[in-house]
Image (cartoon, rainbow, N blue to C red):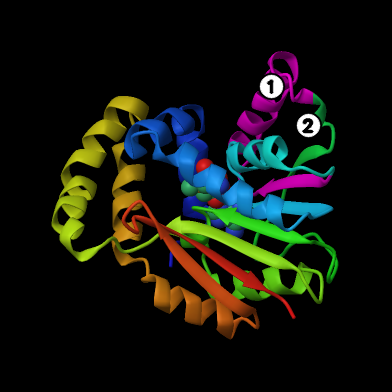
Amino acid sequence: MPEASAVNKMFAGIAGRYDLANHLLSGGLDFYWRRKLAREVSRCRPKVVVDLATGSGDVVFSIAKTLKNPAAITGLDFCPPMLEKAVEKKRHLEKTKKWASRLEQVNFIQGDCLNLPFSDGQVDVLTIAFGLRNLEDRARGLREMRRVLRKPGGVLLVLEFSQPATLLRPFYFFYLRYLLPVIARLATGQPEAYHYLGETIGKFPPRETLTAEIRAAGFDKVDSVGLSCSIVALHQAEVL
Ligand SMILES: C[S@@+](CC[C@H](N)C(=O)[O-])C[C@H]1O[C@@H](n2cnc3c(N)ncnc32)[C@H](O)[C@@H]1O
């Protein structure tokens, strides 16, 4: 698994262009994936939501826009330049969006997913999008997530790359290996970061394995659904 300090440094290096690269590399699908995640959060009617590895905050904003009930939403990340982007975007949204009042209970904090700054059972819903793959110790991260979730009834939602449908695989891996670094170089000037992306996606476990890992961390009712031919998967788990 990747070393935390290297991951932190890498994201600091691409923070300025992270959003643009995301939208280009996913062909805009990332908007749809985050919306799906936000709708699941909304179904839980939470009062306290924490988005881990929040990066530039897009999951937090999508949740704030989607939630039907008022809730405190915190985005946590260990990389200051990514958090600066999130705060900058929040300020911009507050000035430009009709739903800006929903941002009143949104805040961003620096913290480590492997050592969460929350007490046991404090959180109703935890989300983590494209972050689990970057943790230095995934099992420890999952146990820590379980610790801070409300018992019973706390929900974990993980959005992460997965292994796509068999027919798609040759084209997908060709894309990851040869096209993605070129597009990434044009968008960010940092192709190494996106070599890392391709490599970690290729090595990331399929849905069934991740389901087993989530269960092993003590979660119940673990389920998942593939999105966009299983390029990504949305995992859901509950604490009973
Ligand atoms: C690929 S980005 C995902 C950002 C965002 N969730 C999204 O959907 O665009 C991964 C983020 O995980 C953060 N990260 C990785 N390991 C972390 C850790 N141990 N604690 C906190 N943040 C971490 C990185 O700083 C980076 O911002």
Magenta-span inclusion, residue 67: no
The N terminus, quarter of image:
bottom left
The location of residue 48, given as percent across then percent down, is: 82, 54
Question: In terms of depth relative to the viewer, which is nearer, 194 or 162?
Answer: 162
Mark 2, secondary structure of its residue: helix
Residue at horizontal 35 percent and vertical 59 percent from the top: 230
Q: Quadrant of residue 117?
A: bottom right
Q: Residue at x 79, y 61 (%)?
A: 124
Q: Which residues are magenta?
A: 71-100
Q: CA distance from mark 2 to mark 1?
A: 8 Å
Q: Which residue is mark 1?
A: 93
Residue under pointer 2: 103
Q: Amino acid at mark 1?
A: Leu
Give yes or no for contact between labels 2 and 1 (Cβ–Cβ under 8 Å).
yes
In this picture, is 105 found above or below 132?
above
Q: Secondary structure at mark 1?
A: helix
Q: First in sequence: mark 2 or mark 1?
A: 1
Dot 2 surroundings within 10 Å: few (below 14), some, or many (20 or more)? Answer: many
206 relative position to 12: left or right = left
